Image (cartoon, helix red, strand yellow):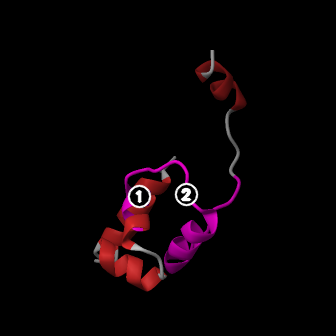
Amino acid sequence: MLTLRDFLKQKRKSANLTQPELASKAGVGLRFIRELEQGKTSVRMDKVNQVLRLFGHEMGPVPMDRQKLTDENS
């Protein structure tokens, strides 16, 4: 599965947008875009959706492998 950071970077580059251009078009700060692309783990979901909306996507719940989670925490 593609991570948010990889998805966003891939979409931005395929749209030929720089980070400052994406920030401007999405109405968020450049720092927020940089943090997303660096994989910051605590971000505001409303702002993430604001950025993803430009690419026709939004965040939502996805199924996860509970056994894998249990194994990782052991």
Disc 2, SS: loop
| Residue carrying label 1 | 35
Residue 35 or 53: which is nearer the viewer?
35
Q: Quadrant of residue 33?
A: bottom left
Q: Which mark is residue 25?
A: none
Residue 47 screen position, x and y as percent: 56, 70
Which residue is pictured at 71% across the width and 30% down the height? 66
Highlighted magenta segment, given as a residue range: 33-61
CA distance separating discs 2 and 1:
8 Å
Residue 8 or 29: which is nearer the viewer?
29
Q: Is residue 53 magenta?
A: yes
Which residue is pictured at 41% across the width and 58% down the height? 35
Q: Is residue 5 magenta?
A: no
Q: Which mark is residue 43?
A: 2
Which residue is pictured at 63% across the width and 26% down the height? 68
Question: How many numbered marks have been drawn onto this rendered protein structure?
Answer: 2
Above or below residue 10? Residue 57 is below
Residue 59 screen position, x and y as percent: 63, 62
Disc 1, SS: helix
Above or below residue 53? Residue 40 is above
Tag 2: amino acid: Val
Left or right of 9 on screen, residue 66: right
The C terminus appears in which quarter of the rendering? top right
Q: Quadrant of residue 71?
A: top right
> How crowded is the residue under tag 2: few (<14 C-alpha within 10 Å), some, or many (20+)?
few
Tag 1: amino acid: Glu
Residue 29 or 57: which is nearer the viewer?
29
Residue 8 screen position, x and y as percent: 43, 63
In primary-sequence order, the first of circles 2 and 1 is: 1
Q: Are marks 2 and 1 in contact (CB under 8 Å)?
A: yes
Which residue is pictured at 37% across the width and 52% down the height? 38
